[in-house]
Amino acid sequence: MSSLKHIAVIGAGPAGLMAAEVLAGGGVAVTVYDAMPSVARKFLMAGRGGLNLTHSEELPLFLSRYRDAASWLAPAIQAFSPQQLRDWCEALGEATFTGSSGRVFPVAMKASPLLRAWLRRLDAQGVRVELRHRWTGWDDRGHLTFETPNGPHTVAADATVLALGGASWPRLGSDGGWVPILAAKGVAIAALRPANCGFTVAWSDIFRDRFEGRPLKSIALSFGDRSVRGEAVVTRDGIEGGAVYALSAELREAVAVHGEAVLHVALRPDVEAADLTKKLSAPRGKQSLSNVLRKAAQLSPVAIGLLQEVAKSQGLSLSSLPPERLAALINAAPVRLTGTTGLARAISTAGGIAREELDENFMLWRLPGVFAAGEMLDWEAPTGGYLLQASFATGAAAGRGVMRWLASNHKHAVIPGRP
């Protein structure tokens, strides 16, 4: 492949940088453009609490986490698998380990050492990075247009990889500004929605003021036929946390359709109803109900507060409930969710470029030579390493797609039903 070919990658997150690495390895000139003053800001933020790169579970189960998108993401993830991602990290000098939950982390537990090593490799491959370049579309010659601190700038590229992310955490660079640009070209885009997000709850002032920021630990959350173990955190406006995020897709859709969703919280999921009833049936003496719940049911203050909040919303008095009803409430406390906490606060984004807009090389049918990867695409996944894995894998797939397209003299992949 001629090294005179110039490929523009727009977006300097994991998907864009991985596409750039694949392309540079293929012998083309690559420039990465990003609107922010530095690269991979969301990636660095994700690494503050320990960078969860991927997951160690068997690949069929791993792929099922992508739900409706699993079938079309599978080839990309199989071609750049969780083990290959770990090997890639090792080659950059960043060893990984598997935690007790099966999640995979770098030993350093940070994104910054990995990113620094990666940028050094890209620099050695000749990849250029242009920051403070906000992409605004194309001019009438088909050249890419950017707004920069020095004014408008145009770039002629032989192919382009778009990796601009979704619209969660917009202050870190992914603000969904690409949506109207592509929509104007006729590209079908599923509405961007919050994923792995928190939900609003109409807490009472007393509960909110006392328990804001307090965690509910070792609980189980249930909605429909799904139940998830984990933790949640009471926020001023509602509830969030890992267990909530795991159910967020179903909860979000229910709220969209019905205006609300009822989440059931099991505060002592490891205790059978009969055993819990027995503990609560013991004579109370002069103990307050709160003391009974703390000692007999081993509930934390925030868990007791949640029970009181739920009882109040239902017009019930906890102290008047018989032990069996109180036990049932402890392990199925209904919390009414009234909305999501918003896209800007979500961990990730659902929606994006529709699957049918892409060929098997991740190129847009309507825009030959323009490829897309990462969270711009219409898929979502739970936390646990699945988000980063798919971003890396689709970035690599788009990079390979560009190389195949160039080698095939600018032809689309042949897919039934498409021209």
Image: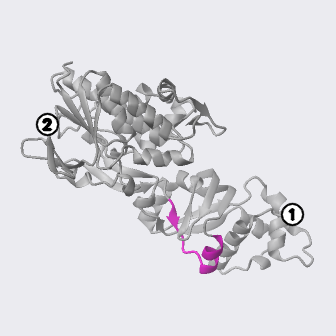
Are the residues flagged by discs 1 and 2 in contact, CB closer than 8 Å?
no
| Quadrant assignment, res 322 | bottom right
Percent position of residue 279, x then y: 86, 63
The reply to whether residue 402 is visible in this rendering is yes
Percent position of residue 395, x then y: 35, 34
Is 38 above or below relative to 262?
above
Magenta range is 198-211
Q: Nearer the viewer, residue 134 or 304?
A: 134
Left or right of 174? Residue 292 is right
Percent position of residue 339, x then y: 46, 67
Quarter of the image with the N terminus in it? top left
- Report which residue position mark 1 lands on: 279
Residue that sits furthest to the top in the current view = 1
Q: How is the rendered protein coloured?
A: one colour
Left or right of 280? Residue 155 is left
| Residue type, numbered disc 1 | Lys
Q: What residue is shown at x 35% (from left), y 29% (from top)?
A: 122
> Dot 1, crowdedness within 10 Å: few (<14), some or many (≥20)?
some
Residue that sits furthest to the left in the current view = 140
Q: How many marks?
A: 2
Q: What residue is shown at x 61% (from left), y 33% (from top)?
A: 98
Left or right of 286? Residue 37 is left
- Report which residue position mark 2 lands on: 156
Percent position of residue 314, x then y: 64, 77
